[in-house]
Image (cartoon, helix red, strand yellow):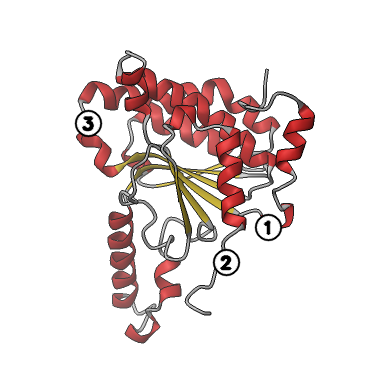
Amino acid sequence: MRLFKLPFKNKKNHARLESTIQLDNIPKHIAIIMDGNGRWAQKQGLPRVAGHREGMDNVKRIVKAANHFKVEVLTLYAFSTENWKRPTQEVEYIMKLPIDFLQHYLPELIEENVRIQTIGEVNNLPKKTKSAIMRAIDETSNNTGLILNIAINYGSRFEMVRAIQDICRDVTDGKYDIDDITETALAEHLYTSHIKDPDLLIRTSGELRLSNFLLWQTAYTELWFTDTLWPDFSFEEFEKAINDFQNRKRRYGGI
């Protein structure tokens, strides 16, 4: 079984292309908006759900690519709070995908030393979906490699409102004074309080927007867009995004 969907003809050519990547400047946290599954299926003359299935298989390939480059955190936007508006049959199918993915690929993820985490309102997912995710989190909790951070039932605006509500409760309970509410305090109440902000955000399918994804956390994230639909997003394009990241100068508001 191939670890990556490689476009290279041979190992020598692969090594030549990879030599452009500076291994000491790999983005520690990469976030991906995995867009274009439905359009991929329609282009193939298939139902939309076939695109979601193909997209799920590509998750495995890109996780291995991230591991290959020793990325520390890979956050994947799997299902947003807005996605519940989609047709019921499609939503039901998407909710089964984490179950199938983890059933088939969890042993490989464990072997790859991947640790699974989530952000979003997991408690509001269907019981079987939540159970599969919690089992995967538990079974990978002792792994020390790449954190596969799955954003599921996630919405950034809801996340920020929830954080503000928690801070207000802390003020009411006397844990905070008003002057203690800082950017750091708010960040500590977000789902992502345990991980650093993304260095690089990738969006597939040609759309040029964030779609309510990590709005606070991406304030200084480098953005990279591609027209490629998610099921076709390959190791080569992942490498291209990293290479582009390494050719940018991150000023954080300075000169």
Q: Nearer the viewer, mark 3 or mark 1?
A: 1
User: Sequence order check: which comes first, mark 3 or mark 1?
Assistant: 1
Q: For marks 3 and 1, give the CA distance.
A: 39 Å
Q: Which mark is residue 249?
A: 2
Q: Residue at x 57, y 34 (%)?
A: 62
User: Sequence order check: which comes first, mark 2 or mark 3?
Assistant: 3
Quadrant in the picture for residue 14: top right
Q: Pointer 2: residues within 10 angstroms few (<14), some, or many (20+)?
A: few
Please state which of residues 235 and 68 is positioned toward the viewer in this rendering: 235
Quadrant in the picture for residue 95: top left
Tell me residue 137's x, y (percent). 54, 39
Q: Which mark is residue 86?
A: 3
Q: Is residue 123 above or below residue 247?
A: above
The answer to the question of whether label 2 and label 3 lie on touching residues, with beta carbons closer than 8 A, is no
Q: Nearer the viewer, mark 2 or mark 3?
A: 2
Q: For marks 1 and 2, give the CA distance.
A: 12 Å
Q: Which mark is residue 175?
A: none
Quadrant in the picture for residue 168: bottom left
Please state which of residues 13 and 30 is positioned toward the viewer in this rendering: 13
Tell me residue 246's x, y (percent). 62, 57
Instruction: Name the residue carrying label 1.
Output: 25
Q: Which image quarter is the N terminus in?
A: top right
Tell me residue 203's x, y (percent). 42, 44
